[in-house]
């Protein structure tokens, strides 16, 4: 057991899998000698050799395209896209190729590939270092989409992702890399070493894909969240005193339907929270699922708290970010409705 | 039994890393003045060798020599020197402001000043640049108000871009500076489209695309070359090879052989390589390529050989991946020093005038900074409104966004 930041946990996951499985390779922009702009691959090249951890040309389509080719030829590539905002050139390879190769070849060819990318805002990165494109992945059949909210999960989920036989998109909320950020940007930063989920076991373990976890048991309203918003929801719950049940989805696709439905049937209310823009965001899917499957248990409309439908701004970052005040207001609103 | 040895993956690596002696012995630098100057309408077939050489004007003794020399008057060359000093002073102030927490982020063009400053002077009004984040020199060497650049960097209440963009991602249609994108290489192909439109409309304006060495690996670079060459678009395609892409040396983008300029050959494009730290050479080559484009002779690919003397950005620490002394060892020297020495040798400049000019520019920049700060910095004073965040997504705000704005209480 060790206290780790999310960066260390992610690095450790790759290190562990590379040590036990020589077919795992890691590459991407600046990931080799330097160890990545967020240092997630630091020392992996030194330890595992430059043919297993190396720098890629700045070409995201090429990074994912070659990873697919490697995966089809027996490797398990885990590639890094420097920021999720830069994955768009790779979207063709992800959405049209990786996702369908198993299906179109009737299982003859498969793509055990993981694509890691830092996601989300809160770092004054402006419109091209802050995006949350998860819905662009969950809309595709044949790939899995994972978003950890803490170091423990990040390590276990990443090991599970690399060992999974299907392509996995692994979104890392960059604002959580160094500490559990609850949206109170004006308060001192809390490091992971002060958080129980910074406690990360040594060696190999997995957190299963497709399983959500209840972060806070509550009776009155179910909050569906992932990534940074789990911590924001916790703060909002604390501050409003609403007895919310907070579900950390962890894997967005495939989704843990049972955990969600059971909770909503119990509480009768549901608030969906994400940082991405609202229209056609993943919250729309969650909201529809809850409505379709739990309609008769609902006592209030399912409510979404999300980023606004604008590009992620620079100066107005905290007006854009759905912080604890907005989540808290939604919790109160659904409690008052009935 | 197979006759073959097991295959092995080749991964290019730079000659040196931190702790090693800088070594640029592999960079082949021809003598100044030694590269010929083709006729403006020469066929690219006739000068393919120019993609493997380096066009240089200023020699070791700071004399301007060879067929690409003698294009600028004393006065014009002094303006060039002043432009480079200005952008360097501007960068230094804004870097400091970022360190003081007045903004979130900054990027300098330290060591690369000659390229944007000289290129700008070869353009005509109405031409359009599609720059990267490292061509602030295109703006600072015009009369675009420096204070507006600072307002943008500060994301303050007078920011022309209303706080929406990351610092340094300027935009000015009037000054031929297309809105900078954070997504690499996208602008390069847009420059080709702008130029094609100029031809479709029967205009006489040309476009200039800008890209870094690392970013030439993007598919958009190759798309640019296909469209530019097929339609003979009136565009100058500029590659700024400053040796580094964050921590990644240029060998990862182009492999061990050839040059970036030589990428143009597969497309039958005129392809030149030029000393990017030589203001006079950059100007001469830019003038040549721009003239060619404007005479409907099609696109030119230019590689500027230079060195990124500073960190990639304020988020970067290059001592983690390259020797600290590498910048000083760069064999093409400093563009400001070289032009200054040339002007002194030409009897058009003196150490005194240099010191005075530098001091004047620094005080102008400082003055502008004080003015700008009256309108706020990122975390204090006047700021763009939350309303501004909702404006400008569409020409007219749709109903769903209007409701969201209401929900936000603004
Ligand atoms: C599509 C895309 N991928 C990755 C990045 C991250 N990134 C920003 S700058 C940079 C390096 C660019 O190097 P180069 O093209 O040589 O330009 P330079 O910074 O040296 O001027 C990278 C990888 C990005 N902005 N956009
Ligand atoms: Mg570069």
Image (cartoon, rainbow, N blue to C red):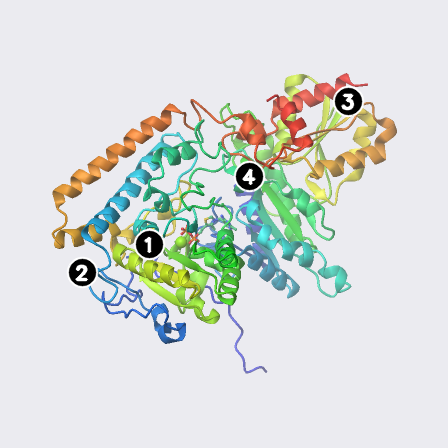
The answer to which quarter of the image holds residue B23 is bottom left
Distance (Cα) linking label 3 and label 1 = 71 Å
Let me know if marks 1 and 2 both belong to one chain.
yes
Q: Nearer the viewer, mark 4 or mark 3?
A: 4
Q: Nearer the viewer, residue A257 or B241?
A: B241
Are the residues flagged by discs 2 and 4 from a single subunit?
no
Say which of marks 4 and 1 sits in front.
1
Residue named by callout 2: B60
Question: Residue A251: image x %, image y %?
Answer: 70, 42
Q: Is residue B394 left or right of residue B201?
A: right
Find numbered disc 1 in the image and state the secondary structure of the residue it sits on: helix
Q: Which residue is mark 1?
A: B122
- Residue pointed to by mark 4: A130
Q: Chain of mark 3?
A: A
Label 3 sits on residue? A219
Q: Residue at x 32, y 44 (%)?
A: B141
N-terminal of the pair, mark 1 or mark 2, is 2
């Amino acid at each position: 057991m060790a206290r780790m930041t999310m960066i260390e946990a992610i690095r450790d996951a790759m290190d562990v899998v590379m040590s036990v499985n020589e077919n795992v390779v890691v590459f991407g922009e600046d990931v080799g000698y330097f160890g990545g702009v967020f240092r997630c691959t630091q020392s992996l090249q030194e330890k595992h050799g430059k043919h297993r951890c190396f720098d890629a040309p700045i070409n995201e389509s090429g990074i994912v395209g070659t990873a697919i080719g490697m995966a089809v030829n027996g490797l398990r590539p885990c590639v890094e896209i420097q920021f999720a905002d830069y994955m768009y050139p790779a979207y063709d390879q992800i959405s049209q190729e990786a996702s369908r190769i198993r299906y179109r070849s009737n299982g003859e060819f498969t793509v055990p590939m993981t694509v890691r990318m830092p996601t989300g805002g809160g770092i004054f990165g402006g419109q091209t270092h802050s995006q949350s494109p998860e819905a662009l992945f969950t809309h595709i059949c044949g790939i899995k989409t994972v978003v950890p909210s803490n170091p423990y999960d990040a390590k276990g989920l990443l090991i599970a992702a690399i060992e999974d036989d299907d392509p996995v998109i692994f979104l890392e909320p960059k604002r959580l890399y160094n500490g559990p950020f609850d949206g109170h940007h004006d308060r001192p930063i809390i490091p992971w070493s002060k958080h129980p989920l910074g406690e990360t076991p040594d060696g190999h373990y997995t957190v299963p894909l497709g399983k959500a976890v209840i972060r806070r048991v509550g009776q009155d309203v179910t909050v569906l969240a992932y990534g940074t918003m789990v911590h924001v929801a916790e703060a909002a719950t604390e501050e409003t005193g609403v007895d919310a049940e907070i579900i950390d989805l962890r894997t967005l696709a495939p989704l843990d339907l049972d955990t969600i439905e059971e909770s909503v049937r119990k509480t009768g209310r549901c608030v969906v929270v994400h940082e991405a823009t609202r229209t056609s965001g993943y919250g729309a899917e969650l909201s529809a699922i809850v409505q379709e499957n739990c309609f008769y248990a609902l006592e209030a409309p399912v409510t979404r708290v999300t980023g606004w439908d604008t590009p992620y701004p620079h100066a107005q970052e905290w007006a854009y970010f759905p912080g604890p005040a907005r989540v808290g207001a939604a919790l109160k609103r659904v409690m008052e409705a009935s | 039994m197979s006759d073959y040895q097991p295959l092995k993956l080749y991964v290019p690596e730079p000659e040196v890393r931190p702790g090693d002696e800088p070594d640029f012995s592999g960079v082949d630098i021809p003598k100044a003045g030694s590269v010929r100057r083709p006729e403006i309408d020469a066929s690219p077939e006739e000068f393919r060798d120019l993609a493997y050489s380096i066009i240089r004007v200023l020699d070791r003794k700071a004399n301007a020599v060879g067929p690409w020399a003698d294009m600028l008057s004393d006065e014009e060359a002094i303006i060039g020197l002043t432009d480079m000093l200005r952008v360097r002073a501007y960068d230094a102030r804004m870097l400091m402001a970022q360190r003081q927490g007045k903004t979130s982020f900054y990027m300098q063009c330290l060591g690369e000043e000659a390229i944007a400053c000289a290129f700008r002077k070869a353009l005509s009004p109405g031409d359009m640049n599609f720059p990267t984040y490292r061509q602030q020199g295109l703006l600072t060497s015009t009369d675009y108000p420096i204070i507006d650049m600072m307002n943008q960097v500060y994301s303050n209440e007078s920011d022309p871009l209303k706080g929406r963009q990351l610092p340094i991602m300027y935009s000015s249609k009037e000054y031929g500076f297309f809105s900078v994108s954070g997504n690499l290489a996208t602008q390069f192909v847009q420059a080709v489209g702008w130029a094609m439109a100029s031809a479709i409309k029967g205009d006489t304006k040309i476009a200039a695309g800008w890209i870094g060495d690392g970013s030439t690996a993007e598919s958009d670079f190759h798309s640019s070359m296909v469209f530019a060459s097929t339609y003979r678009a009136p565009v100058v395609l500029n590659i700024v090879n400053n040796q580094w892409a964050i921590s990644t040396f240029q060998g990862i983008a182009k492999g061990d052989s050839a040059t970036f300029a030589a990428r143009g050959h597969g497309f039958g494009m005129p392809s030149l390589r030029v000393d990017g730290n030589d203001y006079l050479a950059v100007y001469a080559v830019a003038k040549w390529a721009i003239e060619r484009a404007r005479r409907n002779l099609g696109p030119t690919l230019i590689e500027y050989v230079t060195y990124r003397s500073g960190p990639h950005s304020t988020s970067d620490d290059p001592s983690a991946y390259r020797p600290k002394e590498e910048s000083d060892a760069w064999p093409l020297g400093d563009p400001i020093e070289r032009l200054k020495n040339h002007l002194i040798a030409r009897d058009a400049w003196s150490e005194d005038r240099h010191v005075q000019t530098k001091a004047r520019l620094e005080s102008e920049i400082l003055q502008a900074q004080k003015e700008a700060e009256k309108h706020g910095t990122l975390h204090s004073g006047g700021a763009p409104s939350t309303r501004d965040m909702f404006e400008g997504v569409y020409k007219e705000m749709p109903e769903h966004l209007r409701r969201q704005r209401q929900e936000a209480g603004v």
